[in-house]
Image (cartoon, rainbow, N blue to C red):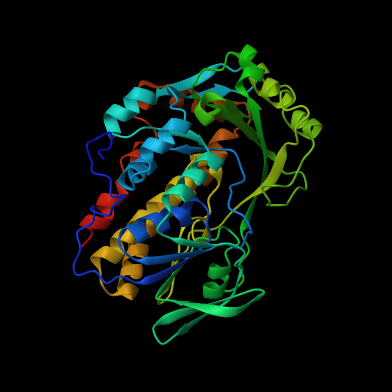
């Protein structure tokens, strides 16, 4: 199978250069997007992969995510990009709008322009659609549900994993913690740490596109920037739904759960006075339960793992959603981890190299997301006017503001590293 730029996908694991690579028993804690991507990449290289998921059922909460070319390049390498493309939406542009009248501050091309420049598409996808396709592709891995990790021990060159309510343990050669911002594996490695509260919360809704056809929403990525808050919306599920996300001051709301219900009237109150597109999308969710969660992240970690245990995705670099890179960075992690294990036969060295390859890039994305929080939320006035002029400048229009993200080739990074 060839990808958009002619790369050979490695669903059959023909993409890595191997140096007498030993195969191992690898455990992954967490069957989210990052954990499943890692399972696909590692099992394709011949490793015996077991995924331990604490939930009793497979499925993803949440709604839309954005997959930029740095992520879709990896999905092509793993042989799943074509399937994702059938359920995704390819936005024509990325538009930043003013909050009160909806006017466009800057519009940068995505669509065919991104495909031509980077060789891979920019997609909007429903998180559940992507997760379902990754589950289907992870057929070589053993996914065990209802396995909540209780304790970890490194014994005689192995990692012993013990679980709540299960009177037996599992031994693996390597363990990967892909278990999110409240990672049990991270806590085992580094003790109890509290994530940093941003002071903001997120409203999330999903409405049928037919319900909001009167808004005339173009097939683009839309972000409305306002004083102290912002609002994002785009189509998902092959255009059947519009995903919307509103970021506003938390006002005492501190629950981080993605499944905590909120009140629609509170969401409307948070965005009172905003343009018709924003208020129209929120009102279209009438009769549904909007979800609300507090936004947390962490400072970049100086170290991700120890010995035969490492971390991946939000477990090591949880980030605010203001770069739309949370899922993309976990996907990058997965393929770099697999490439490192193919290149360096000693597993402890391979995990150390993986961390070295990923630490600076993910830290940059984490900090850029924090910067965007400030940039997006400027109060109307001199600084906001200067921002808008800068965004609309010819220099800004000439180069995509996220080119440094899109250009990155995680597959090549792992293969070419010394």
Q: Nearer the viewer, residue 321 or 167?
A: 167
Instruction: Residue 297 in the image: state x and y as whole percent.
Output: 57, 54
* Residue 405, x across and y down, in percent: 37, 42
| Image-quadrant location for residue 341 | bottom left
Question: Image quadrant for the N terminus?
Answer: top left
Quadrant into which the C terminus falls: bottom left
Q: Would you say 151 lies left or right of 3 here?
A: right
Q: Residue at x 32, y 24 (%)?
A: 113
**Residue occupying the far bottom of the picture:** 156
Front residue (pair 320, 220): 220
For the question of whether residue 223 can be seen, the reply is yes
Height in image: 401 above or below 103?
below
Q: Quadrant of residue 119?
A: top left
Q: Residue 7's quadrant in the figure?
A: top left
| In the displayed structure image, the side of residue 273 where residue 159 appears, left or right | left
Q: Which of 363 and 382 is in front in this view?
A: 363
345 relative to 55, above or below: below
On the rendered structure, is 192 left or right of 330? right
């Amino acid at each position: 199978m060839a990808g958009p730029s002619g790369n050979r996908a490695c669903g059959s694991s023909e993409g890595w250069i191997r140096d007498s690579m030993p195969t191992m028993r690898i455990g992954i804690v967490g069957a989210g997007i990052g954990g499943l991507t890692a399972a696909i990449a590692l099992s394709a290289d011949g490793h015996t992969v077991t995924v331990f998921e604490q939930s009793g059922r497979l499925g993803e909460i949440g709604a839309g995510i954005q997959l930029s070319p740095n992520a879709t390049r990896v999905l092509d390498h793993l042989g799943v990009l074509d399937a994702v493309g059938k359920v995704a939406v390819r936005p024509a542009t990325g538009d930043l709008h003013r909050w009160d009248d909806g006017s466009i501050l800057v519009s940068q091309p995505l669509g065919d322009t991104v495909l031509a420049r980077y060789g891979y598409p920019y997609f909007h996808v429903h998180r559940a659609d992507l997760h379902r396709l990754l589950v289907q592709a992870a057929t070589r891995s053993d996914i065990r549900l209802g396995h909540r990790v209780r304790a970890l021990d490194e014994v005689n060159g192995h990692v012993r994993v013990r679980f709540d309510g299960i009177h037996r343990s599992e031994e693996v050669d390597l363990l990967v913690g892909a278990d999110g911002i409240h990672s049990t594996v991270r806590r085992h490695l580094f003790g109890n740490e509290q994530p940093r509260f941003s002071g903001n919360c997120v409203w999330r809704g999903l409405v049928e596109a037919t319900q909001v056809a009167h808004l005339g929403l173009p097939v683009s990525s839309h972000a409305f920037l306002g004083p102290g808050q912002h609002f994002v919306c785009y189509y998902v599920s092959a255009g059947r739904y519009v995903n919307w996300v509103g970021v506003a001051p938390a006002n005492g709301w501190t629950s981080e759960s993605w499944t905590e219900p909120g009140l629609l009237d509170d969401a409307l109150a948070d965005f009172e006075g905003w343009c018709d597109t924003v208020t129209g999308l929120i009102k279209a969710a009438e009769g549904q339960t909007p979800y609300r969660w507090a936004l947390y992240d962490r400072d970049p970690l100086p170290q991700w793992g120890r010995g035969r245990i490492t971390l991946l995705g939000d477990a090591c670099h949880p980030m605010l959603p203001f770069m739309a890179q949370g899922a993309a960075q976990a996907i990058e992690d997965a393929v770099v981890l697999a490439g490192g294990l193919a290149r360096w036969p000693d597993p402890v060295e391979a995990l150390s190299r993986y961390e070295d390859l990923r630490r600076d890039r993910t830290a940059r994305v984490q900090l850029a997301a924090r910067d965007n929080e400030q940039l997006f939320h400027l109060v109307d006035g001199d600084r906001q006017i200067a921002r808008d002029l800068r965004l609309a400048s010819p220099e800004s229009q000439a180069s995509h503001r996220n080119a440094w993200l899109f250009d990155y080739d995680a597959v090549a990074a792992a293969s070419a590293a010394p």
